[in-house]
Image: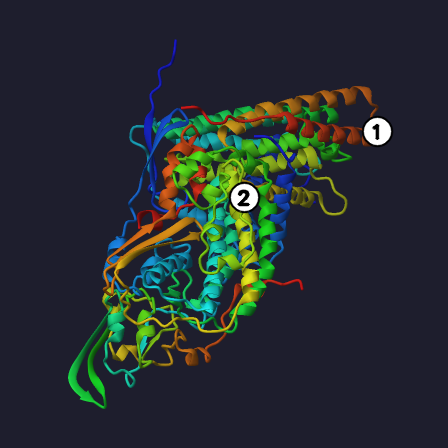
Amino acid sequence: MLVPAISPDWPGGFWLHWGVFVVIILAFVMAMVMGFIYLERRGVGRFQVRLGPNRTGPFGILQPVADAIKVLLKEDIIPAAGDKLVYWLAPVVAFVPVLMVFAVVPFQEGALLADLNIGILYVVAVSSISLVGIFMAGWGSNNKFSLLGAMRSVAQEVSYEIPLVLAIIGVVLISGSMSLNDMVKAQNIPFILLQPLGFLVYFIGACAEINRTPFDLLEADSEIVAGYHTEYSGMKFAMFYLVEYAEALAIATITTTLFLGGWRGPVLPPILWFLLKVVCVFFVIFWIRSTIPRVRIDQLMAFAWKFLLPLALINLLVTAAEVVVLPEGLPWTIIFINLAIMVILVVLWSRFLRLGGGRVEV
Amino acid sequence: MVIKTEPFVVNIGPVHPSTHGVFRMRATLDGEVIVDLEPVFGYLHRGIEKLAEERTYTGVIPLTDRLDYLASMSNNLAYCLAVEKLAQIPVPERAQYLRVIMAELQRIASHLIAVGSFLNDCGAFMTPILYMIREREKILDLFEMVSGQRLTYNYMRVGGVSQDIPDEFLPALKKFIKVMPTFIDEYDQLLSENEILLARTKGVGILPEELAINVSAAGPVLRGSGVRWDIRKADPYSLYDRFRFDIPIGSIGDCYDRYRVRIQEMRQSVRILRQALEQLPTGEVRGEVPHLLHPPVGEAYAHIEAPKGELGFYLVSDNSIAPYRCHIRAPSLINLTALRDMIIGWKVADAIIIFGSIDICMGEVDR
Amino acid sequence: MRFERFGIGIAKGMVVTLKHLFRHPITTQYPEERLTTSRRFRGNELIWNREKCTGCATCAKACHIGAIRIVTATNIVANKYEVETYQVDTGYCIHCGLCVEACPYDALYMGYAYERAKYRRHDLVQNKEMMMETPDRKVSGYFHPERAAKLPRQTLLLDRDKVKE
């Protein structure tokens, strides 16, 4: 029982509960982000048949620390003609909402900062605020290519929100409540089996939200712009870098909570199952990164609107029909129907879909 | 109300986001689409053709190493063929077989880097290029065993090769021939059917057959457009008519076709290597050539199928120890003539991919 | 863009990457492990054999860069010129090996070492005493097969591959 189940009527009351969990969340996020940076660099190195960093500290464990120190010692450049307040606030506005997402994630049964009964709605709403931070970064840099990159990033993230939310609603329908705690308690069978199409749509949408390959055109070095964080250096750049990994962590935790069963598992303590599932999801994220090339901007938008959105809508209809029509105690029928529908839909859509423009006549 | 837009000029390069050396493209953009393109090069000009006039015929060979530095054996071979044609020097048979072995190994190594950096430009985060560099390391180890260096070999000489292969070369080469096809299959499985790669490269940067022939492109660029032309079959040099191999061609000439042509050419090179290894005779490796060669007055042009296209050397001699004029027909430069027609109408992200699929090396373009 | 293979192409690629996770990485931890170079390695220096050199300057004529400087005195002793200055600018030299190939008396060898960096550019010019063969300055077997036979075997990356017979 590494994380005790504290309820608000503990001695000390609400504020002690809040204080303890704020400390736990901050420690968790910071430690896991450092761990993820290390894991990704070593993992991607092993995929590429080489070692990752292994000189700083035993097995290279101190590499994130070395990165942090290097970034802190760099010169902080501020563009002279930009909007200074906006430029300064942008990393903060991008980072804080990502931390706020962890307030409703259950680490164990009942162990979460605030058991909101609109949990998942809160998560969706808050994670959209970091888009504003990205746009502020593009605007405050006074660089038209940064602004272009920021606008593309906002377009990408906004378009992928919609299938994401529709996939989440499928899970809400099956579990019957929006609170993340109740969702985990209702998962006798992990929802990935009950909602395979929903999981696919959610995962692809989430990868696009966090600007990861194959959707990372903004940070690509084969585009002629370097994206919204061109003009940032020093600690502010470190904040954007941190945002990328913290968002990956947030996506991984939400995925395990919604689809993989949170802290549920047979033998080991629940917190260990939670960590294991989060690390597995992150493993898949950087496995995809090291294999697949990236898509073009027009193909990206077409993929969201023409492929993911109809699939998410159909998934929602089918799930709603199942919840109403079929009785509660037949999960295997639901699994079979959902899998069949997913295969049929993916095959059909792939046949008849054409994404992206071709050559323009000049 | 129509919004008035204005095209603006943007510089891509010379410090490139992707590889291929110092090359600058002045692109005129209208929104996202490129409407005009002007390539600017010459940043790597070293005056090789002029320097060749001041060195003996054997002393030019280290210079030719540095033309297309990713495929030095081919450059050496083309130059030596030109001098032998000029001075009518016979080459022993074992030397010719060794030349074929080195040229085909070099073709595999050059195509590995070409495909690897093409996939890197598409965005695959260095995984394919690291796998291909691992294979290239094996070939470079073989070359180091023979000539002593890994990049600029200086191995071919006028009248043969410079020294015979050591004893451990043949077993290592046999092992390489056995192992390489599995790795080529692995590359095919990794990315040839990847939907995102197909979406980025199919139908992108089409070079029509007529234009390719008119522009005198050669190599995988020409064969990707569907023209069945390979100098090893059309004008065989150095005993290539004794080997059986196919010429892979593409169908429409987009980036995907050129990528597939290169991968298939690697397989055919392994096939040629297997046959050359079986037929390798014994004998001398170096003909009787004086130390300071005085070829008769005249001119000669010799061309070979280098990995990047048709590499030709045109030599004019005036009976002295140094060539009077040495002109190099560089395949990368001539293939770049079609760059503007291939890129116009596409977006900036496609321009990098199309440029990467032509596979140039700036050492050749600028000489 | 069409999803022509229904996502299976992506899955196949990911299987390949996963297989590589379980292979041994091919990184060499330099400077703790060093690989053996080939026996004919053209290293960063030239090694001169004073007894065999006759001062004929064929090497200097063969060098097309002009990196070798020979000054001989005019007295001939035992059919050899007396060599006053024999200087090689290894910063200028491109290590092509044409001089070693040209020497008719086997008096010049390529070096075997490659870790010969210096802090000043003028330290790269080597004179006759600095160019003798010592246990520290080993001789490579480029164009000298009798010396090549004494050197250790080259480490090949091919050795790590297992061949199915």
Which residue: 59% across, 62% down?
C161
Q: Which residue is disc 1 drawn over? A: A330
Around disc 2, counting alpha carbons within 10 Å, would you say few (fewer than 14), some (14 to 19), or many (20 or more)? some
Which label sits in the foreground, 2 or 1?
2
Vertical placement of C94 versus A29: above or below?
below
Q: Give me the disc on residue C3.
A: none
The relative height of residue C83 versus residue A232 in the rendered view (above or below) is below
> Left of B41 or right of it: where is A67?
right
- The percent coordinates of residue A124 (x first, y second) are 59, 26
- Quadrant in the rendering for residue A279: top right
- Against A118, residue A285 (above or below) is below
Residue at x-position 34% and y-position 56% = B66
Residue B221 lies in quadrant: top left
For the residue marked with disc 2, what is the amino acid? Answer: Arg
Q: Quadrant of the N terminus of chain A?
A: top right
Q: CA distance from mark 2 to mark 1?
A: 50 Å
**Looking at this rendering, what residue extends furthest in the top direction?**
B1
User: On the rendered image, what quadrant is the C terminus of chain A found in?
Assistant: top left
Query: Where does the image place residue C121, in percent across and percent down from the top left?
Result: 25, 64
Badge 2 marks a residue whose secondary structure is helix
Instruction: Residue B260: give its label.
Output: 2
